[in-house]
Image (cartoon, coloured by chain):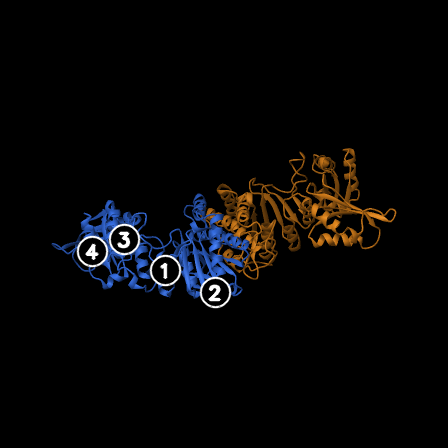
Chain colours: A orange, B blue
Amino acid sequence: MGLIVQKFGGSSVADADRIRNVARIITETYRRGHNVVAVLSAQGDTTDDLIAKAAEINPHASKREMDMLLSTGEQISCSLCAMAIETMGYPVISLTGWQAGVRTNSAYGDARIKRIETERILAELDKRCIVIVTGFQGINKYDDITTLGRGGSDTSAVALASVLHADLCQIYTDVDGVYTADPRLVKDAYKLDEITYDEMLELATLGAQVLHNRSVEMAKRYNINLEVLSSFSGQSGTIVKEVTKTMEKPYVSGVAKDKDIARLAVVGLMDEPGIAFKIFSILARERINVDIILQSIGRGGTKDISFTVRHSDMERAKELLEERQSSIGFDHVDVVDDIAKVSIVGAGMVNNPGVASQMFEALYNAGININMISTSEIKVSVLVNKEDADRAVQAIHARFFSQFGNGN
Amino acid sequence: MGLIVQKFGGSSVADADRIRNVARIITETYRRGHNVVAVLSAQGDTTDDLIAKAAEINPHASKREMDMLLSTGEQISCSLCAMAIETMGYPVISLTGWQAGVRTNSAYGDARIKRIETERILAELDKRCIVIVTGFQGINKYDDITTLGRGGSDTSAVALASVLHADLCQIYTDVDGVYTADPRLVKDAYKLDEITYDEMLELATLGAQVLHNRSVEMAKRYNINLEVLSSFSGQSGTIVKEVTKTMEKPYVSGVAKDKDIARLAVVGLMDEPGIAFKIFSILARERINVDIILQSIGRGGTKDISFTVRHSDMERAKELLEERQSSIGFDHVDVVDDIAKVSIVGAGMVNNPGVASQMFEALYNAGININMISTSEIKVSVLVNKEDADRAVQAIHARFFSQFGNGN
């Protein structure tokens, strides 16, 4: 007996059959005595279709009008899901972002939730109604429709779980949980029962796109228990929470790779204070996210600074630096894009020194060269050649995860 | 220099090219110094597609959820039109029904506008913004989305013209005005420059589906000048107003036919008071509209009552009466559906007796038999056999409209 927020992504509501399946999951939860607030994304390709319609008319449409257009996608999936639940004989109502009281700032296309006015949802729950809410959208102070950007529906669900003091926030996707590695790549990869928010954040950053970072950050801040599970399998998934039962947990929770990456090196910089600030403030101003940063030790009065960016930012970052070559003072910018990042993540690493060296040993034994290394309290990342990435994941997974589930 | 409300129907915004065309019409009006509020329907088949999606999931979906679903159609066309206007460099904003302040009663699927809170629209017009408003929709006192039912976008446009004190309300359709008869049927039919509200109401009722009655009634009540014109031709259309310049006008404004009609006769009724009330209150309770009513003179203590209904109501009306045969007291119900109604409409008929007899003469000369006759101050309708309907329209049109435009 409690309140459960359930979020269903675009593939979970892609057609009439899948909407019926989602309706079954929601009503089964309701029948067990829970109140249910379900947050839905737009159906499968709807958003892409709408974007194509807009592009035909105006490839540079204002973000305000794009949000007006795109927000219809969730309104369609939510009303259809409510209709499916009606056929099963349960009380149900669908609500748009503004009807559900989701108030955001005015950053059209990438808005942040400021608050949720819960009166309407609470009134419907009081009537023991199942409430279906459009994900991904809200309204700003002008009463204009905004969308939350990538992973927005996850964020909607977690925000609702927070303001409604939900007992659990279930994120239904097309995978049935968080794995120790990509199961398509690593035969022995297995599903984790639990993972901490921080581990999930690192894994999301590393390209294991199960949950969007914004939603995990919000869940961590408000201490919302998340469950990642599949709308197709019917099995329990992975719980994401603050502290996991470490006794049952390996030091390392997962191995991930990220191929959407490029490495830039600014070569021949003067070895003087403020150089790093100059370089990274230029990139930050243009909203280019920098990941791993490595600064070489100065030799003969010069030094090099290397860093990684998303592949799509590579050219722009190079241009920005070269435009300022004389004011920064360097010899040239070197770019490499046939690389990948492979990482291990684990909250248990903090108290277990030597995890990094075990990882390096596994790579050495597999004959894989390491280009760059970056570590945090719960993560070790290495850059390797792109062609070695899959083998690196397999070698590292084998080192840390035996067939019994934990090789530490 | 004034405020013009322009309404564009589904065929006018069916694809990207047509949306661009609508954007041109709107911006040309704006460039001439007017403020413009444009009301759009959903694109071509969008509403039908959404209805099909709903039917696949729940053929008996609640009207509340249907309105939630269907209202997305106008939101899509309006945002796309705003994007098209953006490419032309004009300030523009699209607004949903609730953003535009359209408040309705709660009759989902067939709601009535109760009031329009104009603050937002006026604020945008003050900024010299072109305002695009979703037709066909509003919200009720629960903040739930409602739709206005058939002809709803016309009604939205006229209601906005009224509360905004617009100088003109232009209804853009795929015909370029109101004709003296269907031009596909009558070679000599010509476009009227002006027509009165009452004439337009009679013509709409008679099946000349140019404007929906609700919008014309509202225009008459609030004295809004309507113009019916084509979004494709670029020519001026027909003005609908209270009083037209009768000097330039024929007694008869138009000839119309309506084939969606059936005639029922309740035969052998007791000739006593209250019989007509009994019959028509039964039908009214079931929302069956009755048009022409004819009561025979009693013979031998019994009488017959004949009346016409929409074709789709024919079977239900017959059933309803037969269920109550013993309480009403009659012999049997006779049904005929191979009939059509042909009518002449004209505000000038009031002061010109003999118009009806000219119409009957034209039919007599064409050898067409008249089954029933109904007259009002500005209309004469006759029922004829369905196969004679087109010839009847042609004969009547030839009688009243010479090649010089007016045969009266």
Report the residue marked by disc 2.
Answer: B118
Residue B184 is situated, as x and y percent measured from the top left of the image, at: 32, 47
State which tag comes first along the sequence, 3 or 2: 2
Report the residue marked by disc 4.
Answer: B358
> Do the numbered discs 4 and 1 sit on residues whose CB atoms are within 8 Å?
no
Q: Answer whether residue A52 is visible to the viewer in this image.
A: yes
State which tag comes first along the sequence, 4 or 2: 2
Write down the chain letter for disc 1.
Answer: B
Q: Which mark is residue B336?
A: none
Q: Secondary structure at mark 4?
A: helix
Kindly give the residue lying farthest to the right in the view shown: A300
Above or below, A192 relative to A138? above
Q: Which residue type carries mark 2?
A: Thr
| Discs 1, 2: same chain | yes
Label 1 CA crowd tier, 10 Å (few <14, some 14–19, many 20+)? many
Write down the chain letter for disc 2.
Answer: B
State which tag comes first along the sequence, 1 or 3: 1
Report the residue marked by disc 1.
Answer: B239
Q: Which residue type carries mark 3?
A: Gln
Disc 4/disc 2 C-alpha distance (Å): 50 Å
Kindly give the residue lying farthest to the left in the view shown: B300
| Discs 4, 1: same chain | yes
Report the residue marked by disc 3.
Answer: B403
